[in-house]
Image (cartoon, coloured by chain):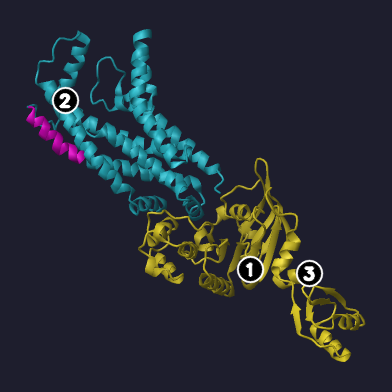
Amino acid sequence: MSDGQRSPTSDGQIVVSGLTKQYKNVRAVNNLSFTIQPGRVTGFLGPNGAGKTTTLRMLLNLVTPTSGTATISGHRYADLSEPLRHVGAVLEASSAHKGRTGVNHLRVICAAAGLPRQRADEALALVGLTPAAKRKFKGYSLGMKQRLGIAAAMLGDPRVLILDEPANGLDPEGIRWMRGFLKGLAHEGRTVLVSSHLLSEMQLLADDVVIIAAGQLVRQGPVDQVIGSMTQGVRVRVRTPQAEALTTALKGQSATVDADGQGALLVSGVDAATVGRTALAAGVELHELTTERPDLEGVFLELTAGKAGIR
Amino acid sequence: MNLVRAELLKIRTTNTWWVFALISLPLWALTLLVNWLQSDALTSGDLGEMPPEQAAQLAAAAHPDALSANLFTTGQFFGLLIVMLLGIIVVTSEFFHQTVTTTFLTAPHRSAVMIAKLAAAALLAVLFWVVTTGLNLVAGAAVLESIGVGNQLGNVAAWEAIGLNGLAYLLWGILGVGLGVLIRSQIGATVTGILLYLGGTIGAAIAISVLAARFGDWINDLQLLVPSLASSLMVAGTEIPGNPPRWAGAAVLIGYAVVTGVAGTLILRRRDIS
């Protein structure tokens, strides 16, 4: 796409269109299309082997697509004039020379990208790695390696951030730091695309999700919408010594009642307030009354059921 | 230019360069000792009975041109091996440490990266040559004085040999880079390179002399096709009777360097990095 055709709104936008990668025996990515908006954190989800990493690598010109296109702000990655000033990517936690110090690793990248040398120190400070700057990479913990990868991605102060499984190997403190950091970047108007299979973390972090399985798009949209779109809606868990009386009363309210097998009832079709009011009117004693929302994990498992696994 | 600077910084920020320098130094000293003893033996006269052809070769080798050419290129045998290994490491360490992803993200134009690597390896090779030659000019002149032929620092043939020696360093550095792309595994490329160099030199030399004895002298000219022999011919110092001319060795070696360099670039451009 030439500059003339590019609309101003495409700045920071990632567009994947009809992307396909055929390996010898496997179609790793199959006619995949989606759009990622700036100013939001987008979770890129899929079971192992779904084609997440291959898709990201095609987006970054590391793997050549069999067909289709992937553009960032309307350009292929290879056509960006100063790629690091536009896109920062964290692909493997272990991608630095083991005998090189953290700060030297970043200085090499600065030299290659024509960035000022002090950006290396600034980026280290940004991820809180300054005390380990002069330590060799082989002495880094997994969490420090992840932080160094993020520092490398931030060297060019990019508009677009792409991270492949950044939470792998981080401790709870590190994960919380990463969540805040990425949300902050999105808040500044940057595009943040994060692949992961840690669904509970994604539910806390992501605004939008793109779910793929077996190389194909399964669902795309804001997290709440994707969760809400599922057949299994909100349910109310009730615990009572008078289960039969309550079930009869609730059925009068056209609710569906199931036993959960652990002594409680699962009520759908009505909200918790209605359940409480119905119980009060029927003189039924309640021990528990909880609203259960479907989470991303449940939705994900339902959406990708039967499509996961080794291909 | 940025990319070449980055490649040099990559080498400077790891142990590689000084480990290689440290290995090279004793090897250079050892070669110097051998060359000294050999030069001393050649000039001290009586070498016993021999066929006239061999006598002519020895007489050529005892000429000050040959002696100085040999001494001023001391350390070459291992030096070329070392710069080839450096060239290999410039490429294979990127795959070994998985830094190639970062390298290609920083510079998506892979040909430019490959050219930078070739340039960096060539610069390193030339640096090795400059340092070795500096040592040789001091030590070699001293040896030549001690065996009574003068320091030969004004000898054109000696400087010619020094120049061709530099070309050999340059070309082996480039060959190393090409080999590193063709064989990504660090160990695989290193072993292949060493075999190609040492085994090529010794094995091919034996094979060719056996074949030459059987089928005639023209087989001798085939040694040109073996990179290590082409190289040793190129840097032979002086024209040795019965051998192909030196420029032919240079031409063959340049050919190999160009082929591996271009083939390496083309392969790297197409390869999926995952």
Question: How many labels sit on residues?
Answer: 3
As drawn, A37 above or below B245: below
Q: Which residue is mark 1?
A: A202
x 50%, y 60%: residue: A84
Q: Which mark sits nearer the N-terminus, 1 or 3?
A: 1
- Three-letter code for the amino acid on which mark 3 is drawn: Ser
For mark 1, does the 10 Å Cα neighbourhood hold few (<14), some (14 to 19), or many (20 or more) residues? many
Disc 2: which residue? B38
| Residue A212 location (% of width, % of height) | 70, 58
Helix, strand or loop: magenta stretch: helix
Q: Which chain is cyan?
A: B
For disc 3, the marked residue is A229
Query: How would you rate the neighbour count of disc 2 (Cα within 10 Å): few for under 14, some for 14-19, many for 20 or more?
Result: some
Helix or strand or loop: what does disc 2 sit on? helix
Badge 3: residue crowd in 10 Å (few <14, some 14–19, many ≥20): few
Give x and y (percent) for residue B34.
18, 29
The chain carrying label 3 is A
Say whether residue B114 is left or right of residue A38. Answer: left
Segment colored magenta: B133-147
Q: Amino acid at mark 2?
A: Gln
Colour seen for chain A: yellow
Q: Secondary structure at mark 1?
A: helix
